[in-house]
Amino acid sequence: RFPDDTDRELNAIQKIAQEAGAVATAVSDAFSTGGDGAQALAKAVVQAADQPSHFEFLYPLDLPLKEKIETIATRIYGAAGVDYSPLANRRLQLYSDLGYGKLPVCIAKTQYSLSHDPALMGRPTGFQFPIRDVRLASGAGFLFALSGDIRTMPGLPSEPAARRIDIDAAGNITGLT
């Protein structure tokens, strides 16, 4: 809840969520009261998470990697087709050859458009969706294709370097190198 939100607005949002099948709804007052104001929302999230799930991928996992990418690009993003860079083609072949072809695929792209191009607003259609690279996140169990000018965040190692930082008895910071 923000200061300008009315009870009427919040009730309308909760009603729409319930009609759409929400297991539980709650208003969060975390903005004004901190963590205590999010207690009801946290309980609603836990209640929803405890429900059985019937998740299905958009595509069968045994579909070839290129077809998974093309399914996402055409059915979700509105693309007419997909163009692969030579690097993306090599990586897709490598990951398939190494036995990673049945993993799910995610796509990293601009957050400003359903396309790869932040200038294409709304629901663009008929464009070619470029894939410039494909990377493997074997520990997480998926591959991700990169489209457009997007940067990805590095994952943390199982033992973050920050755990080695300390201050010795003389007040010197250690563990930074």
Image (tube, rainbow, N blue to C red):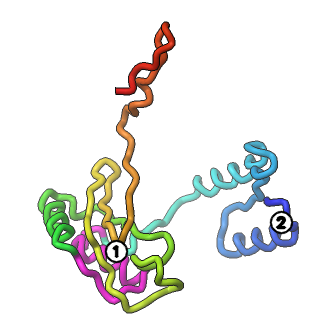
Identify whether 49 is placed above or below 61: above
Magenta-colored span: 61-84
For residue 17, which numbered disc appears in the image?
none
Q: CA distance from mark 1 to mark 2?
A: 40 Å
Question: What is the quadrant of the N terminus in the image?
Answer: bottom right
Work out which residue is located at the far right of the displayed protein and give it.
7
Q: Per the image, is 1 magenta?
A: no
Disc 1, SS = loop
Residue drawn at (36%, 65%), measured in percent from left and top? 106
Label 1, residues with CA under 10 Å away: few <14, some 14-19, many ≥20: some
- In-image side of 8 versus 61 (left or right): right
Q: Per the image, is 68 magenta?
A: yes
x and y percentages locating residue 47 in the rendered image = 65, 53
x and y percentages locating residue 61 in the rendered image = 29, 68
Q: Earlier in the sequence, mark 1 or mark 2?
A: 2
Q: Amino acid at mark 1?
A: Tyr
Residue drawn at (66%, 67%), measured in percent from left and top? 22
x and y percentages locating residue 177 in the rendered image = 34, 27
Disc 2, SS = loop
For residue 59, which numbered disc appears in the image?
1
- In-image side of 123 versus 157 (left or right): right
Q: Nearer the viewer, mark 1 or mark 2?
A: 2
Work out which residue is located at the far top of the displayed protein and give it.
169
Identify whether 45 is placed above or below 80: above
Snapshot quadrant of residue 102? bottom left
Label 2, residues with CA under 10 Å away: few <14, some 14-19, many ≥20: few
Q: Amino acid at mark 2?
A: Asp
Task: From the viewer's side, name the closer residue of 54 and 175.
Answer: 175
Residue identified by numbered label 2? 5
Snapshot quadrant of residue 136? bottom left
